[in-house]
Structures are given as C-alpha cells and as structure tokens.
Amino acid sequence: MKRVFLLIVILVSGFLLSGCSYNELTAKQQGVRGKWADIEAALQRRADLIPNMIETAKMVGVNEQEVFGQISEARSRLLNATSAAPAGGDSTPEQKQAVIDAANSFGGTIGRLLSLSENYPQLRSSEAFMKVQDELAGTENRIATTRQDYNKAVTDYNTTRNSFPAVLTAGLLGFKEEPFFKADESAKSVPTVGDANSMRQHK
Amino acid sequence: MGMRAAAHFRGYAVLRPILAALLVFCAFAAAGIAQTAADPSDPTTLQPTGFVNDYAGVIDPASKAALERKLTDLKNSTNPQVEIAVAVVRTTGGRDIFTFSRDLARTWKIGSKADDNPSALLFVAIDDRKYFTQISRDLEDELPDGLVGSIQRQYLVPEFKKGNYSKGISDTIDAYIARIRDKGNTSGPATPQTDNTPKSSAVSWFLCCGLAILGVIFLIALYYGNKGGGGRGGGRGGGSGGGDSVVPWVVGGIIGNVLDAGSSSSSDWGGSSGSDGGWGGFGGGGDFGGGGAGGDW
C-alpha cells in the first residue's frame, strides 16, 4: 500500500514537473520553426538563382551539359519537396527530412558550378558571370549559416525534450524530435564556398 | 544534548574556512573572467576599438582617422542607423574567411539593436591575401552579394595588388556609403539616438554602483553587529572570529575587481580610438545571416 502511494506521488510530481517544461518546449519549438523558415528562404533563393547562373554561363560559352542537367534535376526535386511542406516552418519532421534530402541531392554540383572559372578563364573577365557567381556563393553561405543556426536550435530543443521531466510527457503532448540538417557527404568532398572564392586566384 | 550542540558548533567552525576559501576562489575566478587574452586566431577574442580596427597595422593614421570620421558620420546621418565596421588582421589562422568574419560580426554585434539594423563588416586578412564583406540581413537590399563582389573587384583588389591597403579600403567604403545614400537612406535625426544611449547607461551605472555600495554598507553593518553580539555573549572562539574577518575582505575584493575591469576596459576603448572620444561600442545588432561577398588578390 505504502509502495503504491509512493509510486503515485512520483508519477504525479513527474507530471506536474513536466507541466513546467511545456512553456519552455513551446518556446524552443518556435525557435526551431523560425530557423527552419530561414533555411527554406535560403533554399528557395538557391533554386531561383540556378537558372540565372546557367543562362549566364551558357552565354559566355560554357558547355557543361552534364553538370547543368544534374543541377536542373536536383532543383526540381528541391522545389517539389518545398512545395509539399507548408511554408512558415510548420512542416512536420518528416517533411523537413524530405527537404533536407532534396537539398543534399545537389551533391557537389554547386561546387562545380562555382569553380567553373577554373576551367574557363574567360569567365573571369565577365563581370556578369562573376556577379552571379558571387550571388550563388552568397546563397551557399546563407544556407550554411542558417543550417548552423537551425542545428543549434534543434540541439537545444531536442535536449530539453529528451531530458527529465519533459521526456515523460513530450510524446503525449505532441512534441516530436526534430531532424538535424546534416550536410551531404558528397558535398563535403568538394571545396566549401570559402574555398570556392579562393579558386579565383590569379596565377 | 549539550555535547551534540558542541559537535555541531565544531562542524560549523571547520566549515567556515572552507566557505572563506570558496569565496576567495570566486573572487579570483571573477578576476580571470574580466581579463580575456586577445588570441588573433579566435574571432571571439578580438576587441573592437572603433569602427576601424587594424590589427595588422597597414592603415596609415590619417586614413584611419578619416575613415573613422566618415563611418561615425554615416551612423549619425542615417535612419535606420547604418553601422559599417572595418577589421584587418594578419591571418585567420587557417580558418575559412567567411566563417571567421561572420563570427566576428556576430560577436561584435555590429548594427543597432532596433528591428531594422543595417550593418556591414569589411574584413581583410593581409597575409592570407583574402577579403570578405559581411552584409547584415537588413542591408542586403542596398548591397546584394553580386554588387558587393563587384565593388570590391573594382576598388579594393587593384589597390591591394599595389599594396595601397588604406586607399583600397577607403574607396570600397566610399562606394558602399554612396550606394546606401543612393538607395534613399539619408534622412536621419543626427542627435537623439546618440545622446540617449550614454545617458541611460550612465543612469544604470549609478544605480548599479549605488546598489553595490548599499550592499557593502549592509555587509559591514552585519559584520560589526555580529562582532558586537559575540562580544556581549563572550562565548565565541578565536578561530571562528578569524573566519568572519575574511568575508568583508573577499567581498571587497570581488567588487574591486569588477570595478577595475569596468574602468580599464572603458579606458581601452576610448584611448585607442584616438581623435574622437565618441566611440561607445557597436549598437548590439549582429544579425548577419551569410550575406556579402569576398575573394582574394
């Protein structure tokens, strides 16, 4: 009898304690949503820029049909994934994961686009191309930055969600674990954007 | 019962030196936090001394003063206020220049605290031969990445190739400022914002000081009150009295450290900015989301 009573006390106090963490969880979830919206904006920017970049590259005589094809394919995959999820960061963890996968499906193609001026020295004298390249590099920098900020918010949220006492009731209250935006492995093998800038070395 | 009380008392007497030691430790820890060594390869340890921060010593004093004036003027004549900072280092220590300069801009919190906080940081690593301009989210409309890259290729790179770092930097800044003014950010009350901040910080400083002084007085009163009580009772041991006397010293030490750190850091900022004494730190924004462009020469 005494043991049952003790158990009840523990359960009730655990539930009450998790009530305290509800507000905290909500606040942190809002943080994650805000950062996710930033990521979507940056990804959208990338998708908008790519046709522009390809057009400019073609205009100055770049002929890389294979890279252009891969990029266009990845771009439509990304647009499909982002349009499936509601805008504004209310997407479920599964929808987020789909967008992350689509974003990573660009692989190293962006890096190759950014290093085109290596193989085509004439591009360096085209201010129009250099400008678009700066825009694309800036977009990649934004994606990297928002990804870092998002992951930080997710770490914060997931840690709170999975630690006592919130873990007892988080599932019941509908607080799901949020996915990390992991960088694509194949993208790691190509130079990062900072290095892409350095590839414009004048030798 | 009497024996138990005596044992309890002895336990307290043993604890007291430990508590005193803890307080001493805290005082030292506070002193340690107050002094941060400047490690040039870590963006978070660099301290700003004005709008122009030349850690590599490549900008001549006249250009630096002119730039400083220009950037102060820009801040005071724009609404929303635009803060542009310049930082020149020898090297980023192998770190990516984009990440380094972004972290620096965020650490310094360049830009005003308001919702609309357009700001920028022109960052140069001389020995790495690389440059990058960070643009805050609210300045991206005026200075999109492509334009920032163009301006730097036009004004900064050719001068840097000739070794004219001062000219390259000021011409680039001029182009940024011209663009911001072209886009219509020219109207601005010059005085109100700049006057308000030091006043309110002075008020809070006095408030803080007053509270600290009240705290000290309270502690001293407590100390003497205790001592007097002990004297009347006559039953206190010598050892415990010794433990008591440490406390005001330690508290005084902590307060002294804090005051010292505050005054020394403020004199640093005022001192090295040189000609104008108006440097009061950046606005507290730091909303940099990855905008801007860079390259090398």
Image (tube, coloured by chain):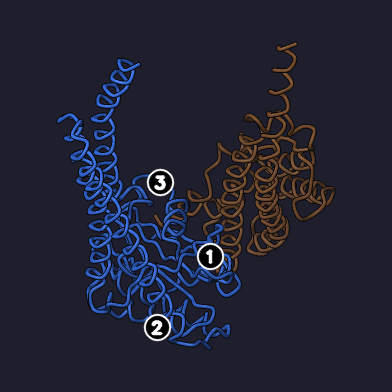
Chain colours: A brown, B blue
Q: Residue at x 66, y 63 (%)?
A: A56
Q: Residue at x 26, y 37 (%)?
A: B25
Q: Residue at x 30, y 15 (%)?
A: B3
Q: Is residue B291 above or below residue B242?
A: below
Looking at the image, do the residues carrying marks 1 and 3 touch, with CB atoms under 8 Å apart?
no
Q: Hey, what amino acid is under mark 3?
A: Arg
Few, some or many residues within 10 Å of mark 2 (<14, 14–19, 20+):
some
**Which sits in the foreground, B73 or B258?**
B258
> Callout 2: helix, strand or loop?
helix
Per the image, the residue denoted by label 2 is: B73
Of the two numbered discs 1 and 3 in the rendering, the one whose residue sits closer to the viewer: 1
Q: Quadrant of the C terminus of chain B?
A: bottom left
Question: In this image, B140 relative to A37: left or right?
Answer: left
Q: Residue at x 47, y 51 (%)?
A: B99
Q: Hey, what amino acid is under mark 1?
A: Ser
Specify the subunit that label 2 lies on: B
Residue B136 tag number: 1
Q: CA distance from mark 1 to mark 3?
A: 21 Å
Residue B95 tag number: 3
Residue at the extreme left: B238
Quarter-wise, where is residue B117 in the image?
Answer: bottom right
**Which sits in the foreground, B251 or A149?**
B251
Q: CA distance from mark 2 to mark 1?
A: 19 Å
Specify the subunit that label 3 lies on: B
**First-in-chain label (1 vs 3):** 3
Q: Hey, what amino acid is under mark 2?
A: Asp
Residue at the extreme right: A84
> Callout 3: helix, strand or loop?
loop
**First-in-chain label (2 vs 3):** 2
